[in-house]
Image: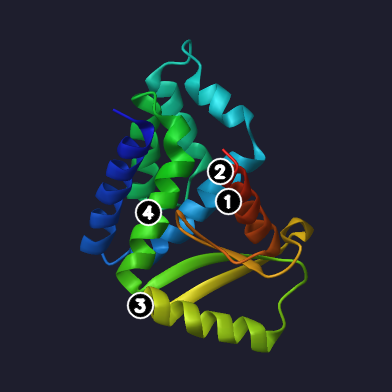
Amino acid sequence: MSEAIVAKRYAEALFQLGEEKNSTDKFAEELHVIREVFQTDQKLFTFLKHPRINNEQKKQFLKEIFQGLQPDVVHTMIILAQRDRIEITPSMIDHYIQLMNDAKGIAEATVYSVRPLSNPERSALVKNLSKRLNKGTINLQNIVDTSVLGGLKIRVGNTIYDGSLSGKLRRIERNIVTANK
């Protein structure tokens, strides 16, 4: 079974548990903390994947470093470590956040532009995206990327809307190449 499917199943189980306990927001906050810990300390993955460290030591270690977090979140991390699936943690967290955002009608969007967007441009883009995606709220992140040359490239989940000048030039080049064959 692919890691993405497994990560999604763990995320769905944790999300259902969060809904039952009215703790989905709290779980999300704590999962962000866990993601931050794993991103800043790569040795943590190595330790938790090491075959000579038994499950009881991994369990105790996770309880100590994530002390103060919700028991269900910590328990999920322990299960992932014990089943040698700790590497799917970032993917599981992403799926959880996506489930929570879908439940709340929120979409995460990343906009690549040549320069930072002004507030009026940003608000117009949020308005258009929320209408197009049928979402109540759009969390917009603007990344300055000079390779787009002009226009915008927008990523929402796995969908990319490429209205950039570089994207249009690539499409024109592809059309010319296929026409000459």
The answer for how far apart the CA atoms under marks 3 and 4 are is 20 Å
The answer for how far apart the CA atoms under marks 4 and 1 are is 40 Å
| Residue 10: percent from left, percent from top | 30, 42
**Residue picked out by circle 2:** 178
| Residue 55: percent from left, percent from top | 38, 21
Task: Name the foreground residue: 7 vs 79.
Answer: 7
Q: Secondary structure at mark 4?
A: helix
Point out the frontmost of discs 1 and 3.
1
Relative height, residue 85 to residue 38 (above, below):
above
Which image quadrant: the C terminus? top right
The answer for how far apart the CA atoms under marks 3 and 2 are is 36 Å
Point out the frontmost of discs 4 and 1.
1
Total marks placed: 4
Q: Which of the two discs, 4 and 2, labels the residue nearer the N terminus? A: 4
Q: Residue furthest front?
A: 180
The answer for how far apart the CA atoms under marks 1 and 3 are is 33 Å
Q: Secondary structure at mark 2?
A: helix
Q: Are marks 1 and 2 in contact (CB under 8 Å)?
A: yes
**Residue picked out by circle 4:** 96
**Residue picked out by circle 1:** 175
**Residue picked out by circle 3:** 134
| Residue 39: percent from left, percent from top | 61, 42
Question: What amino acid type should be assigned to the residue bearing mark 2?
Answer: Thr
